[in-house]
């Protein structure tokens, strides 16, 4: 089925690779106009060129409030009001025990994974309110649902739990304006970030996944499309786990 996102204008952060680039391709295929943002300008521009007139790339530091204002302004000038935000950008940060974790590393992870989600929601809400509604999808992690033994650090888990809480709070605050806010909690997905944390096939991670495989990024994209579309019109303030059964153990 195509055209599920006709009329949607979406900002997708961290769009140059991994899940972000998969989301961008799938969103355009479903009829959306997309503003792709990333600090990797070369890869971002290449993807936007591939996607054609339905895509605009903007180089963007997601932890910079002024940069968010610029992204929204450029997106509105190109495609019109923003009615979808996919807060996808994120980092793993260092592999560290809590005792050994430097405060500056903790703050860096939280800046990209947590502060940026707040800034993104804050930046698009006025546009969505003016247009009578919208959908915000915040990409968290299974590490925002349960503690993960051997996770990169406390900072990663703390930031991903924070995304879950912020999602619920903004959903409550702006539900009356027809703005829906949901979080997605992926498990082990076959992305460059995953490759940085384990081997190509997932290593021991497969033993923790009842389906015994890693997910393709496009499988997460299908969930994001559903939440961005009018098909999910009565779903808000909820966490949506896509982990092959990992958190059922």
Image (cartoon, grey):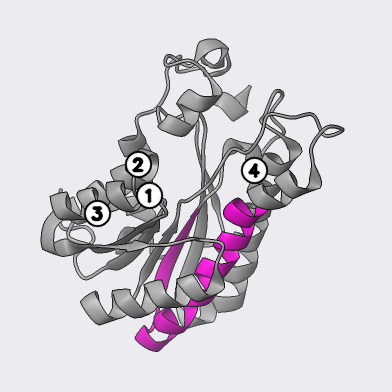
Earlier in the chain: of badge 4 and badge 3, it is: 3
Instruction: Tell us which disc is closer to us: 4 or 1.
Output: 1
Q: Which residue is mark 1?
A: 40
Q: Which residue is mark 2?
A: 17
Q: Which residue is mark 4?
A: 144
Earlier in the chain: of badge 4 and badge 1, it is: 1
Give the residues drawn in magenta, as a range. 110-138
Helix or strand or loop: what does disc 2 sit on?
loop
Query: In which quarter of the view is residue 38 placed?
Result: bottom left
Q: Residues within 10 Å of mark 4 (few under 14, many from 20)?
A: many
| Extreme residue in the bottom direction | 130
Above-or-below relation of 59 to 134: above
Quadrant (top left/top right/bottom left/bottom right) for the C terminus:
top right
Mark 2 to mark 4 CA distance (whole Å): 22 Å
What residue lies at 12% left-to-right and 57% top-to-bottom? 52
**168 lies left or right of 10:** right
Location of residue 243 in the rendering, given as x and y in whole percent from the top left corner:
50, 31
Above-or-below relation of 246 to 139: above
Helix or strand or loop: what does disc 4 sit on?
helix
**191 lies left or right of 28:** right
Whether residue 16 is visible here, answered yes or no, is: yes
Pick the front one: 66 or 210: 66
Location of residue 219 in the rendering, given as x and y in whole percent from the top left corner:
34, 36
What residue lies at 61% left-to-right and 29% top-to-bottom? 247
Earlier in the chain: of badge 2 and badge 4, it is: 2
Whether residue 2 is visible here, answered yes or no, is: no
What number is the disc on residue 45? 3
Would you say residue 50 sits in the magenta stretch?
Answer: no
Above-or-below relation of 63 to 95: below
Earlier in the chain: of badge 1 and badge 2, it is: 2
Q: Residues within 10 Å of mark 1 (few under 14, many from 20)?
A: some
Instruction: Tell us which disc is closer to us: 4 or 3.
Output: 3
């Amino acid at each position: 089925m195509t055209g599920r996102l006709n009329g949607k204008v979406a900002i997708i952060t961290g769009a140059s690779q991994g899940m972000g680039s998969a989301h961008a391709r799938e969103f355009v295929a479903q009829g959306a106009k997309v503003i792709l943002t990333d600090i990797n300008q070369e890869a971002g521009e290449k993807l936007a060129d591939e996607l054609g007139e339905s895509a605009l790339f903007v180089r963007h530091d997601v932890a910079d409030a002024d940069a968010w204002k610029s992204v929204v302004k450029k997106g509105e000038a190109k495609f019109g009001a923003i009615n979808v935000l996919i807060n996808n950008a994120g980092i793993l940060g260092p592999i560290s025990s809590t005792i050994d974790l430097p405060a500056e590393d903790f703050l860096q992870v939280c800046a990209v994974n947590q502060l940026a989600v707040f800034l993104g929601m804050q930046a698009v809400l006025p546009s969505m309110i003016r247009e009578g509604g919208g959908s915000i999808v915040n990409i968290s992690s299974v590490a925002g649902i349960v503690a993960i033994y051997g996770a990169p650090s406390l900072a990663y888990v703390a930031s991903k739990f924070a995304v879950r809480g912020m999602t619920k709070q903004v959903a409550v605050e702006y539900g009356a304006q027809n703005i829906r806010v949901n979080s997605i909690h992926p498990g082990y997905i076959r992305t460059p970030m995953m490759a940085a944390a384990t081997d190509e096939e997932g290593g021991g991670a497969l033993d923790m996944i009842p389906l015994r495989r890693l997910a393709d990024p496009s499988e997460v994209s299908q969930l994001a499309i559903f939440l961005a579309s009018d098909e999910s019109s009565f779903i808000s303030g909820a966490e949506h786990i896509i982990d092959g059964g990992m958190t059922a153990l």
